[in-house]
Image (cartoon, rainbow, N blue to C red):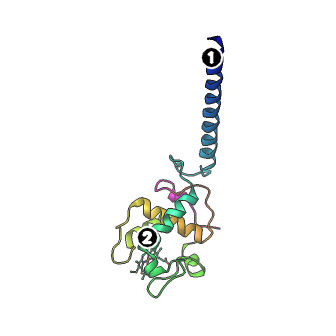
Amino acid sequence: MSHSRTAASSILATLISAALTACCVAAASAVRAQAPGAASPPTSTDTFDAQVARGQDEYLNACAACHSSDLSGGEIGPPLLGRLFNAKWKDKSAKELYELTRDTMPQGAPNTLTTAAYIDIVALMIKSNEYKVSAPVTEENAGGVVLAP
Ligand code: HEC
């Protein structure tokens, strides 16, 4: 009886310590994901890289036909990276890029993607232009995300 109670409490102690470890790892990465000075910290455990990966899928579906699969531009659409794009977008905000994209793209069918998909594609454009970002872009914080290396 006393032996099995000891075994049970040792299992319990192991479970509690595993739960605490998982909890603290999650809390630590949540803290890292917050941008200094971001208008509103992301509420989920999303990461910028996960966002870029989703943006890549959305982009291939909705944008690559005109802008090419690597954003370098096609016969119809201009490049979404490089010198010309930078001349236009550097030091503007992710929010401005998001709003222009939402309001005009895909050309001929603007505002037909979800907000999340547009934001994820903006993250892809940020990554492709090597602009610096320290947290996932959200509709709320996009105004404070400056497009700069
Ligand atoms: C049917 C072809 C077509 C599709 C599909 C398309 N675009 Fe475009 N895109 C264009 C053209 C053409 C322009 C130039 C428009 C202009 O200058 O008025 C443009 C311009 C842009 C610009 C502005 C570039 C700059 O230099 O400022 C962005 C950003 C953009 N597209 C993003 C996207 C995204 C993101 C998607 C997918 C959601 C997309 N486009 C889908 C044809 C397309």
Q: Is residue 112 visible?
A: yes
Where is residue 63 shown, x and y percent of the image? Answer: 44, 75
Q: What mark, if any, has residue 4 been given in the picture?
A: 1
Label 2, on which residue? 101
Q: Which mark is residue 24?
A: none
Mark 1 Cα within 10 Å, few/some/many (few <14, many 20+)? Answer: few
Residue at image location 60% in from the left, 37% down from the top: 23
Q: Quadrant of residue 84?
A: bottom right
Quadrant of the image where one finds ligand 1: bottom left
Q: Residue at x 46, y 73 (%)?
A: 60
The residue most toward the bottom is 75
Q: Amino acid at mark 2?
A: Thr
Q: Nearer the viewer, mark 2 or mark 1?
A: 1
Tell me, yes or no, whether the highlighted magenta stretch contains residue 141.
Answer: yes
Residue 54 higher or lower than 4, as above or below:
below
In what quadrant of the picture does the N terminus appear? top right
What's the magenta region? 138-147
Looking at the image, residue 65 lies above or below residue 146: below
Under circle 1, the secondary element is: helix
Q: Main secondary structure of the magenta part?
A: loop
Q: Considering only order in the chain, which callout, 1 or 2, is on the residue closer to the N terminus?
A: 1
Q: Quadrant of residue 31?
A: top right
